[in-house]
Image (cartoon, rainbow, N blue to C red):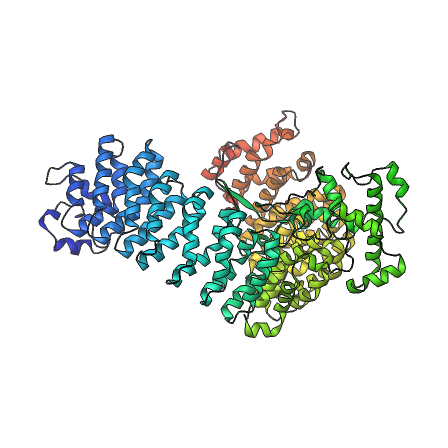
Amino acid sequence: MAGLSLYFEDGHDDLDDFGFDDYGSDCDGIRITAFLDAGQDNLTPLGRLEKYAFSENVFNRQIVARGMLDVLREFSDNENDFISIMETVARMSEDGEPTVRAELMEQVPNIAMFLHENRPNFPEAFSRYLVPIVVRYLTDPNNQVRKTSQAALLVLLEQGLMSKADMEGKVCPVLLELTEPSSDDDYKIEAVAIMCKLVSMLTKDTVEHLLLLRFCELCGDVRLFQVRKVCAANFGELCSIAGQEATEKLLMPKFFDLCSDSLWGIRKACAECFMVVSNCTNPEVRRTKLSPLFINLISDQSRWVRQAAFQSLGRFISTFANPSITGLHFLTTSNSSNSRNSSIDGSPDSLIQPRSEQLQSTSDLTGPPSHPPEGNSSAQPKEDGTSSGQPTHSAPLSRQQMDDCTMFNSFSFWRSPLPDITQDLQDTEVINFPVCFPLAAQVKVLSAALKAAELESQREDADESVSESNSCTGSPTSDELSAMSELSLTDAQISDSPSSSPVLNVIPQQLLDQYLSMTDPTRAQTVDTEIAKHCAFSLPGVALTLGRQNWHCLKDTYETLATDVQWKVRRTLAFSIHELAVILGDQLTAADLVPIFNCFLKDLDEVRIGVLKHLYDFLKLLHADKRREYLYQLQEFMVTENSKNWRFRYELAEQLILIIELYSHNDVYDYLRQIALNLCSDKVSEVRWISYKLVSHVPFSLLSKIATTLHNELIMRFCHCTKWVGRQAFAFICQAIVEEDCMPMDQFAQHLLPSLLSLSSDPVPNVRVLVAKALQQSVLEKTYFKDPGSAYSDELEEALSELRMDKDRDVRFFATLDPNRNVMDTAALI
């Protein structure tokens, strides 16, 4: 646009009244619709639009196409003008110049949004005038026009502007036509790409009826590897929408073919989406078919395929978790009739989403629950990722009964030695079995389970458990085991195979071995230099899948990663150690995680920030005596390798606001108070601002005797400060104390309010601004001060009267402002 004047100097005569004469070559902004202004031709604005829209000069047509949205804004109020403009748009879409068509298509999403917001008959106008242009441009011979139309189509779908009827009746048929075997190669590759992007925005019914079979055909395209590669890259998305039944019946055979494709790029794409595909299958398919397939990818001859497979290994293992046992579940969002899995972002928190109530109940147990086999009927996952949680009997169990049965084999609620409960069962109902089983069978089941539990507690190795336990207490009788089998209880309820390894009941052993090998130094040389980082990233998900009882399988790996020479590996663990502590419980945390946590506290700042960001989350999981040991180390966070790293101190202040509630009043006064006051004197205003909020929380947590001392310290340190910034901070702290009810209002009025009122006559306007804001918006809003009989009501009114007549405009504004009105944040003034 900078060269407009040069262009018009050599233009046609009819450009004299084009409307750009007043703009120089250095003009930053040009009103696109200037060509509609009155000129020498005596044409109406729409007549001039018609003139330039079909001018022989290409530049004229480009300008009209670029300014079509502005034209609609000016003339769409009149129905006749609107129809005339839209018909002009339709005719311009047939322009023979590709740049004009591309310019027009770039404006289509903006025009559609404008019509949607301003036209009552938007669906009809959009479907009649704009949709045909988008669809026609999908087959345009010019590559730029096609790319622009594809991008416009995605925007229209994301904004929800295109109806289902238009998608199924106009867009999808064109895509199906372009993906025919006889279609042009370039068109076919582009159509496959746009089709794969569209499936995430369409309903499940539309995908199944129109696109699913064609997608399966494209996965087997033997002529164009680009088509197969696009299909492989988007395979997981399509599985999520199609659901478990269609995935296993139609898509899974194609996935096997793609995983064994001759091109490594296609196999790599399959490895990257393996977790999503696995989540769309039942546990039996996942264990018997997908696991061997994944092992093949890990052992692939291409280093890039192995690299992608190892990066996805931890996430694939997480799909073996039983939601009813571990609390692991995949977040689902509703897309019409679809139940789809949420995508994985870059943090470990997004990899696993434990249900907090289940994790909390699990952490209260002295022994962890076992995992049932994936194919067991009592915890068979449904298509939406949830667990039915019901056995095969006709009489369903309640949720509480199911929970009792699920954690039955841990016997954490039984005391040793185990009593004889045969007689008690006849009087008291211990577990509510279905009524169809006689009492004798229930007694046999419980007796067998108690014996099995006693055997488990005495064995040290799974392979030697049978011989050792038989010598101690004897094995369950065949009648008892038969009764257990008759009731169809799962391994998670009763362990009927004491000699089996619990890990094998959760994930295939080969997958675990491959995961543990990711810390092998040779892997970094032959697979990926950052393979240890990927192992650290997915470790919380693997730990949650294996369960607390199998932590010993991961303990050595975790310790190896915690001492890795790469700080990025240690940083990844530092950011997720609080999540791992929730999974392992307080006992294992104290024994295995606390030493590593202490090492992270002394590590590089890049590692320490991971610990610091979740310091409260980790400390609250420790016992009070262990938590108190860290009081002495909190001061160390004030020291960083780079003094300019102010965000470190900012994060410390945020965490201390939460940590205050974990410690006693004396500990807060002796240790945290001084840290908070030091942060209030920081050189960076952002740190000071959050530190003032921290200080406002301290008085609420202290005993009255200590609080009085702190109040006096606040007054001397801030209110009487020689620098105006300190006095301004005192006003802000007082406002925060009042707004968050950090102390009783009668004590606030007695200790802090007189000093706050004294600042109403401060010589610095910035101090008076915050005083006015604190009094008008916070103090006077409290019931204690609204009472006319309040001891300080006269002083408050007098101070506010002076502030309302202040010579500074900002002071007057905040002194008279309605407390319910939202205004700009004044934190920047601090």
Residue at 13% from the left image edge and 54% from the top image edge = 9
Q: Is residue 563 visible?
A: yes
Eyeballing the image, is 345 above or below 93?
Answer: below
> Residue 463 at x, y = what percent?
78, 64
Q: Is residue 4 left or right of residue 806?
A: left
Closer to the camera, 817 or 442? 442
Which of the 4 image quadrants contains residue 739?
Answer: top right
Eyeballing the image, is 11 above or below 596?
Answer: above
Residue at 62% from the left image edge and 38% from the top image edge = 738
Q: Is residue 631 visible?
A: no
Which of the 4 image quadrants contains residue 532?
Answer: bottom right
Closer to the camera, 437 or 754? 437
> Residue 536 at x, y = what percent?
61, 63
Q: Is residue 791 left or right of residue 797?
A: right
Which of the 4 image quadrants contains residue 796?
Answer: top right
Closer to the camera, 212 or 540? 212
